[in-house]
């Protein structure tokens, strides 16, 4: 993978967190979409648009995402990201605009759910 592709993957994906449970604090969560193998899902994540699909293999969901960004004031670019999500686990992709995409591989690895989430900052009480 070239440096440019690596940088694009890091920029577009934000922080990838594999979590044991999909519990998140969210200001607004849209109803999750159910994905079946090789059936694409389309999600908006602020300035980015994401199209994803998965295949079930070796007890995991092999997720592929195509991330498109750009508009009138910027050139268009599309990048591809692939990640393996174990059955019963989730992958969360954060964007710089305060949005997250949450993909959860169901226990059978035969379906996934995909949701776009607006993140909230956590409140920390000083003692």
Image (cartoon, grey):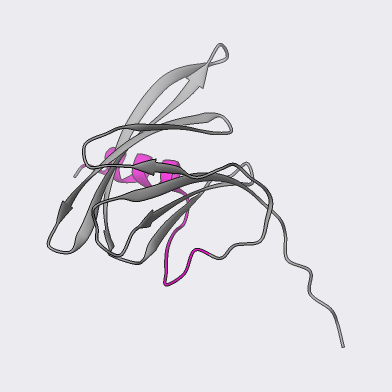
At 34% across and 67% down in the image, what residue appears? 88
Q: Residue at x 59, y 33 (%)?
A: 46
- Residue 99: image quadrant is top right
Side (left or right) of 78 relative to 109: right
User: Is residue 68 shown above or below 3?
Assistant: above
Q: Position of residue 78 (x, y in %)?
A: 35, 27
Q: Which residues are magenta?
A: 2-22
In the image, residue 13 above or below residue 106? above
Residue 48 percent across, percent down from the top left: 50, 31
In the rendered view, tell whether residue 89 sits above or below residue 72: below
How far across and how far down the image is residue 91, in percent?
A: 40, 58
Query: Image quadrant of residue 41?
Result: top left
- Residue drawn at x 47%, y 69% is 21
Res 33 quadrant in image: top left
| Image position of 100 (left or right of 91) | right
Q: Residue at x 66, y 61 (%)?
A: 25
């Amino acid at each position: 993978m070239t440096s440019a592709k690596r940088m694009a993957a890091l920029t577009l994906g934000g922080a990838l967190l594999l979590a044991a449970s999909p519990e998140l604090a969210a200001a607004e969560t849209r109803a999750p979409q159910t994905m079946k193998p090789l059936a694409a899902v389309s999600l908006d994540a602020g300035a980015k648009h994401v199209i994803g699909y998965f295949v079930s293999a070796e007890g995991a969901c092999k997720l592929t995402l195509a991330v498109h960004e750009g508009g009138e004031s910027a050139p268009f670019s599309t990048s591809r990201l692939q990640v393996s999500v174990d059955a019963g686990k989730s992958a969360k992709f954060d964007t710089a605009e305060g949005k997250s995409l949450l993909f959860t591989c169901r226990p059978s690895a035969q379906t996934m759910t995909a949701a776009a989430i607006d993140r909230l900052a956590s409140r920390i009480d000083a003692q």
